[in-house]
Image: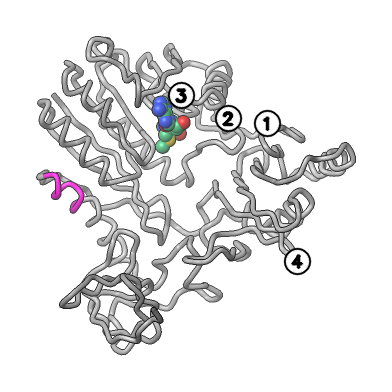
C-alpha cells in the first residue's frame, strides 16, 4: 500500500527518540518530530516519514551545520539540551516505574561534543569510493562520519585516511564493520568481514601505514596486520589495553562518571569484591585500588587484555580473573558469599541469572551498571524482591543525541 499523507499531533517521544502520535486507531512513530508539534507525514503502517513541521515546538533547535537527519548516529540533535537530558532521565524513571520501583534517580551526567573515543562504523566500498560512517536510518546506505561532531578529534580528522584504508582492504561492493578506538598509542583499527584475503603485497603496503604514528594497530578479520605501538589507555596507576575490535567504554568522560559512581556505591569495605562482565577491567582495575577483586568475563580476548593490564599495574590489591559464561553458569549464592560487594555490567540483555543468584545470597552491596534501562529495571525488581534496597541511580549520557542511556545503581542489603 502506498504511504498516505496525514496530519499528526505528536504526544511524546519514544525510546529511540521518534515522536509518537496516538490517533484514534493506532500509534504512529515519526522520526524527527517533537512533542506538541503538528506535522504532516507520509504514513505507512506504524511509521510516518516527516514531510513538514506545521507547528514547531519551542524546544526545537537547529541541528549543527551539515547534519543529516537520517544519520543513525545522533537522531536527537533537533531537541534543546534541557528537554533532551530530561527525556533521557525519564527513560530510566519510566523503566523503573513499569516494574513498580520509585527509584531515587539522580540528574543525568551530560556529555560534551568531541568525546566519542570508540566508534563502530560501517565501511562500504562502492563504485564511487569507500565510505566509513553510520547506517542511514531505514536504508542500506552509509552516511560518512567525516565532520561528525561527537567523535574525538583524533578519529574525526582521520576519517578520509580511514576511508582510504578501508578502500584498500575491502572487496568490491563489500560492507564491513570497522571499529576505531583512539588510544594513547594511536588509533586501534579493526576491520571485520572484509570479504578479501590480504596478499603479502597488501600486508607490506598496509604495514608502512604504521610508520606515520596515527595508527597503533591494524587488525583485519581478527588477524593482526601490524602493531606499531601498544594501543593502551592510561588510567592513573594502570593502563587499559583494548582488545582489537572489543568492548571499550565509548567516551572517556562517561567512563569517568561511571567509575566515580561505581567506586562510591561499592562502599569503603576492604572485603573482596567481584566484578562480573568485567571486560578489559574498566571497573576491576579501579576497584582493586582498595580491595581484592575477582573479575569474571566470558570473552577470551578481553580476559587476555585484562591479564596484560594486571601484569603492568602497580600498587593494586590482588586481581583474580575467571572465565565463565554468566548467562548459563552464573556464580551461585554460595560462591557469591565470598564477596562484600558485587559489581555487574552486562550487555543489553541484562543479568537476570546473576540477579537471581544475588537475591538468594548474603552479599551486602550490589552495584549494577547498565546500558539498557528495561533489563536493568527487571533485574532491579529481582534484587529488591530478594531483600535489597535501591539507594541511588546515576544515569550517564555516554552516546550524545542518541536513544542510548547508561546508568550505575547501588543496592544495599
Ligand atoms: C557492557 S560490557 C562491560 C565490560 C566492562 N565492564 C567495561 O566496562 O569495560 C559487557 C561485557 O559482558 C561480557 N559478556 C557478554 N556475555 C557474557 C556472558 N555470557 N558471560 C560473561 N560475560 C559476558 C562481554 O564480553 C563484555 O565484556
Quarter of the displayed picture in which ligand 1 can be seen: top left
> Within the image, what quadrant is residue 292 found in?
top left
The region drawn magenta spans 93-99
CA gap between label 1 and label 3 equals: 23 Å
Q: Residue at x 16, y 32 (%)?
A: 382
CA gap between label 3 and label 2 equals: 17 Å
Whether label 1 touches label 2, CB < 8 Å: yes
Does the magenta portion include 95?
yes
Whether label 1 touches label 3, CB < 8 Å: no
From the image, tell me which residue sits under label 3. Answer: 298
Q: Earlier in the sequence, mark 3 or mark 4?
A: 4
From the image, tell me which residue sits under label 1. Answer: 230
Q: Using a 10 Å C-alpha cutoff, classify the residue at mark 2 as few (fewer than 14 neighbours), some (14 to 19) or many (20 or more).
A: many
Say left or right for 110 vs 184: left
| Dot in front, 4 or 2 | 4
From the image, tell me which residue sits under label 2. Answer: 241
Amino acid at each position: 500500500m502506498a504511504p498516505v499523507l496525514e496530519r499528526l499531533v505528536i504526544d511524546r517521544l519514544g525510546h529511540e527518540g521518534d515522536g509518537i502520535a496516538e490517533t484514534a486507531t493506532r500509534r504512529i512513530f515519526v522520526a524527527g518530530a517533537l512533542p506538541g508539534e503538528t506535522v504532516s507525514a507520509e504514513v505507512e503502517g506504524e511509521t510516518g516519514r516527516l514531510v513538514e513541521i506545521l507547528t514547531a515546538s519551542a524546544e526545537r533547535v537547529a541541528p549543527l551545520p551539515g547534519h543529516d537527519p537520517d544519520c543513525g548516529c545522533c537522531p536527537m540533535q533537533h531537541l534543546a539540551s534541557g528537554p533532551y537530558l530530561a527525556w533521557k532521565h525519564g527513560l530510566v524513571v519510566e523503566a523503573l516505574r513499569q516494574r513498580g520501583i520509585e527509584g531515587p534517580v539522580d540528574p543525568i551526567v551530560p556529555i560534551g561534543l568531541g568525546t566519542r573515543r570508540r566508534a563502530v562504523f560501517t565501511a562500504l566500498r562502492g563504485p564511487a569510493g569507500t565510505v566509513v560512517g553510520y547506517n542511514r536510518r531505514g536504508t542500506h546506505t552509509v552516511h560518512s562520519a567525516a565532520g561528525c561532531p561527537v567523535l574525538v578529534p583524533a578519529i574525526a580528522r582521520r576519517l578520509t585516511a580511514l576511508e582510504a584504508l578501508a578502500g584498500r582492504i575491502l572487496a568490491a561492493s563489500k560492507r564491513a564493520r570497522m571499529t576505531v578506538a583512539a588510544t594513547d598509542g594511536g588509533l586501534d583499527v579493526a576491520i571485520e568481514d572484509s570479504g578479501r584475503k590480504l596478499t603479502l603485497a597488501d600486508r607490506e603496503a598496509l604495514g608502512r601505514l604504521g610508520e606515520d604514528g596515527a595508527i597503533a594497530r591494524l587488525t583485519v578479520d581478527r588477524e593482526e596486520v601490524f602493531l606499531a605501538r601498544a594501543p593502551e589507555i592510561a588510567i592513573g596507576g594502570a593502563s587499559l589495553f583494548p582488545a582489537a575490535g572489543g568492548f571499550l567504554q565509548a567516551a572517556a568522560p562517561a567512563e569517568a562518571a561511571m567509575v566515580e559512581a561505581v567506586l562510591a556505591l561499592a562502599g569503603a569495605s576492604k572485603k573482596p569484591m567481584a566484578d562480573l562482565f568485567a571486560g578489559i577491567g574498566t571497573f576491576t582495575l579501579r576497584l582493586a585500588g582498595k580491595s581484592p577483586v575477582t573479575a569474571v568475563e566470558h570473552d577470551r580476548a578481553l580476559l587476555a587484555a585484562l591479564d596484560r593490564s594486571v601484569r603492568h599495574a602497580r600498587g593494586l590489591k590482588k586481581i583474580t580473573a575467571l572465565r565463565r559464561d554468566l548467562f548459563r553458569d552464573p556464580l551461585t549464592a554460595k560462591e557469591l558469599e565470598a564477596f562484600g560487594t558485587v559489581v555487574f555490567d552486562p550487555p543489553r540483555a541484562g543479568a537476570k541469572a546473576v540477579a537471581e543468584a544475588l537475591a538468594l545470597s548474603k552479599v551486602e552491596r550490589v552495584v549494577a551498571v547498565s546500558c539498557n534501562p528495561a533489563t536493568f529495571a527487571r533485574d532491579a525488581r529481582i534484587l529488591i524482591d530478594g531483600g535489597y534496597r535501591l539507594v541511588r541511580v546515576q544515569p550517564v549520557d555516554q552516546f550524545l543525541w542518541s536513544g542510548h542511556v547508561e546508568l550505575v545503581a547501588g543496592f544495599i542489603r
